[in-house]
Image (spheres, helix red, strand yellow):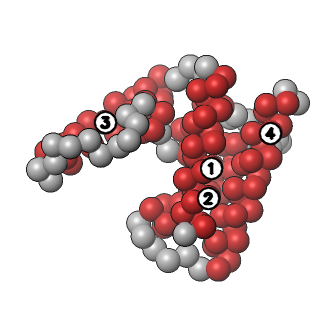
Amino acid sequence: FSSYAECFISENLIRKYIEDKGIALSQEAIKEITERKNNENANKNLGNISIDIRRSSSDLSYLSMDHLANLVDKEDPIKKASLSRDAREYKPIRDALGHTALLADVAKNKLTTVYENIKGRVRTLLSGK
């Protein structure tokens, strides 16, 4: 459960940062949001679901860690620490977790490490360094 919570918190921490800083959505992000919303509506229709699924239907809730990180902090991953670099490390583990896989202990540790790095990076961004 802690691994799931760390995934949830990591993505929502970046969403909160984007909202607080008023960061504009890129054309790529808008395209992704539109695609995800359309897929969700199609799947709801196929599943005979007429109720709301999401507590919040804000556009940011449709973006994955990759897209969120690129909106905030896209840098050359070889030369500089960035959220987009964290997102690359985070994705394979998050995807496995999202498909209800039980994580190996080393994967849990990696996810926790990336989560701590994301928190540190957001602190750095907030401090303006």
The Cα atoms of the two marked residues, 1 and 4, are separated by 13 Å
The Cα atoms of the two marked residues, 2 and 4, are separated by 17 Å
Q: Earlier in the sequence, mark 1 or mark 4?
A: 1
Name which residue lies at 59% across and 80% down: 104
Local SS, label 1: helix
Q: Earlier in the sequence, mark 2 or mark 3?
A: 2
Q: Position of residue 23 (x, y in %)?
A: 61, 22
Up-down relation of residue 95 to residue 108 (above or below): above
Local SS, label 2: helix
Quadrant in the picture for residue 127: top right
Q: Amino acid at mark 4?
A: Arg
The Cα atoms of the two marked residues, 3 and 1, are separated by 22 Å
Proximity of marks 2 and 1: CB atoms separated by less than 8 Å: yes
Extreme-right residue of the structure: 129
Q: Earlier in the sequence, mark 2 or mark 4?
A: 2
- Classify mark 4: residues with Cα within 10 Å, few (<14), some (14-19) or many (20+): few
Residue that mark 4 sits on: 123
Q: Quadrant of the C terminus?
A: top right
Up-down relation of residue 93 to residue 36 (above or below): below
Q: Position of residue 105 (x, y in %)?
A: 65, 80
Answer yes or no: is residue 35 visible.
Answer: no
Residue that mark 1 sits on: 10
Answer yes or no: is residue 97 visible.
Answer: yes
Nearest the eye: 127 or 69: 127
Q: Amino acid at mark 2?
A: Glu
Q: Earlier in the sequence, mark 4 or mark 3?
A: 3
Up-down relation of residue 43 to residue 125 (above or below): below
